[in-house]
Amino acid sequence: MTFWNDPIHFIAEWLRGLFIGWGMSGDVANVLIALIGAVVLASVAMVLDILLVWVERKVVARFQDRLGPNRLGPFGLFQPFADILKLIIKENITPAGADKVPYNIAPILAMTAVLLLWAVLPLAPTIFGVDLNVGALYLIAAGALGTLAIILAGWSSNNKFALIGAFRAVAMMVSYEIPMVVTLLIPTILAGTMSLNGMVKAQDVWFVVLSPLAVIIFLISAVAELGRAPFDLNEAESELVAGYHVEYSGMKFGLFYAAELLHAFTFGGFMAVLFFGGWRGPWAEQYPLLGLLYFFVKAMIGYWVFMWIRYTMPRIRIDHMLAFNWKFLTPLAFVLLMVTALVDKALAGAETWVYALGMFLANVVVAWVTVEILRAYSRRRRLEEEAPAKQVIRTGVEGQAAHH
Amino acid sequence: MIPLSWYLILSAALFSLGLFGVLARKNAVAILLGIELMLNAVNVNLVAFWRYGNLTSIAGQVFAIIVFAVSAAEVAVGLALVISVYRRRKTIVADEIDMLKW
Amino acid sequence: MTPLQLVFLLTAALTLVAAFRVVTTRNLVHAALWLVVTLFGVAVLFVLLNAPFLAVVQVVVYIGAIAVLFIFAIMLTRREMRDQGAQLNKGWWAAALVSLLTFGGLFWLTRSWDGFTRTAAPLPTGQDTLSALGKALVSPDAFVLPFEIASVLLLAALVGAVYVAYREK
């Protein structure tokens, strides 16, 4: 075993030898190494977060035809450090009448919920926190904690805007969790396992080819789960000032902000893992560090798509958003799940290309039927809306004729 | 190793606390909270008996999942009732909701 | 004392303290938040019992849906949230007595059973509990009927909840 083939185990073995050399027992050394691993993983995510602040500010600037931060360091790369410094030296305000303990726990919980996700993210063939056999569900579980953080923040701030933001967040996240769970079951069917590393290993053909519709549904529900535009109703600036974090200042607000950015990047990573082959790429099996590179490039592209959507779409009204979920996205996800399961059973044992083609065609058929149903529905709605209007115009004209 | 007795004692304590909540609380929502505690105690027991009993039979976990479903249904209907009563009577104190019809 | 035992004792203490706060706290939102802590403790117990699937479902269903629903309902009925007077009714001492007797009875009952201090057999290697569970839930000679009835129950609860809480315009 050399460093290049399996870096994490190489370092772990080396550390283990070192600790035992210092006179520790094997068990204690193992616990200590696991702890160090967890701290390192969380630190990498947080350091990456600093970079993401720069990426987000730079990309939004380009979308809005500006230059973005470009004064501090090369390409403005040191801007995030200035931002952090500013947030740290700001006064930490706890509003009067706030519920102190939940108020202070909420930002930490928001960040924790995101960092928890990194525990199951397979970064490279041998580089991951744990390979849970319920990894796909774990994703939803961590999301539930994020929802809780928003409720805590909104409720404990003792502010009506914050509370409305929290209400909206609950309505949105609880409902968009359903299509997300259902679409997570589609890669589960295709890979035959819920373990995320197992899913990556099963993607000889990327799942985006097998099930493009699932990618779209997952993307939409992920945007809702992230609470980013066009689903950023929980912090809609033009209506709620800043929504659930309106009362937060300084680094407490900073934690919400950092959690949001890292959450978006992490979901880009999950898109890559679930549908775009994760760390797979040429020579990734032999050299895990290469897999790490592939993963981060794919995750960055996913993150860029989230930003693209965010800075292009206007905000959706809350009733439209809920209706869109319950009347369109959820039924579609269920139909797609059933079709995928049936096709998977029908084509079990077929050759890879037959299987892939069958799955793809099934998706195309589902998409086509959906579009046809939507078209028929909107035609009917249009006729209903136009019919009385025409009548009014005609009576108007006749009335004028009679008058003459 | 953790003996089975630890789980059983914990679960009994959790169940009793839930029972106390159900019997002693005035607020209807708080009574539902107590019921949740009792259902969780049952789940701990079911899974512990699965783990310490016959591992090839999965019945304990299946029962736990059905308890999940039942408690989700119970909370949905229970809270809907509480909210509906609150709208009409402006109270959620269980003692004041004592008429059969209004 | 092994590390696992330590983890169990800490989790158990946290769970019981949180459960006690659930039934005694005056502020109902706090009670719901303590319920979240209890539910999380139970999830940790599921992990200790080698049932990771149930642990994750516990977090998704209980914390993600049920506890959030509770907090929602408490906020909607918030006029009662301002704690006017006692949160416990007049007969609370009788309730305390009954629950103490229940605990004592359960303790006595299980202690007289000879499997009380049983320890767990090691999990057989290569046994996939998750797929066994999945197959048991949909297999006709196992639990498909209870499973289907549970899903019908959920559907009925969904329709019922919407009907009951619907406000006529």
Image (tube, grey):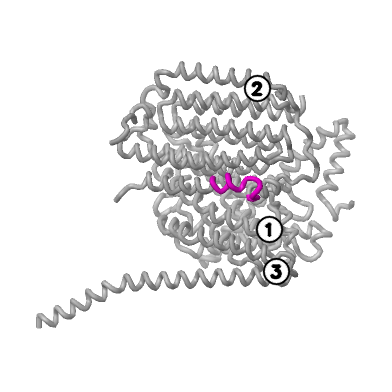
Query: Is label 3 or label 1 in front?
Result: 3
Look at the image and say whether residue C51 sits in the magenta stretch: no
Q: Which residues are magenta?
A: C138-149
Are the residues tagged 1 and 2 within 8 Å (C-beta)? no
Are the residues tagged 3 and 1 within 8 Å (C-beta)? no
Q: Residues within 10 Å of mark 3 (few under 14, many from 20)?
A: some
Please tell me whether residue C109 is drawn above or below residue A353 in the rendered image: above
Disc 2 marks a residue whose amino acid type is Thr
Q: Which residue is mark 1?
A: A273
The subunit carrying tag 2 is: C
Look at the image and say whether residue C148 sits in the magenta stretch: yes
Q: Residues within 10 Å of mark 2 (few under 14, many from 20)?
A: some
Disc 3 marks a residue whose amino acid type is Tyr
**Residue C158 x, y percent position in the rendering:** 45, 47
Please tell me whether residue A27 is drawn above or below residue A348 in the rendered image: above
Asked if both marks, 3 and 1, belong to the same chain, the answer given is: yes
Q: Which residue is mark 3?
A: A355
Q: Residues under labels 3 and 1: Cα distance?
A: 21 Å
**Residue farthest to the front, as pictured:** C141
Residue at the image position 57 percent from the left and 55 percent from the top: A180
Residue at the image position 57 percent from the left and 72 percent from the top: A365
The residue tagged with tag 2: helix, strand or loop? helix
Q: Is residue C70 left or right of residue A26?
A: left
- Visible residue check, residue A393: yes
Query: Is label 1 or label 2 in front?
Result: 2
Q: Which residue is mark 2?
A: C110
Rendering quarter of residue A384:
bottom left
**Residue farthest to the left, as pictured:** A404
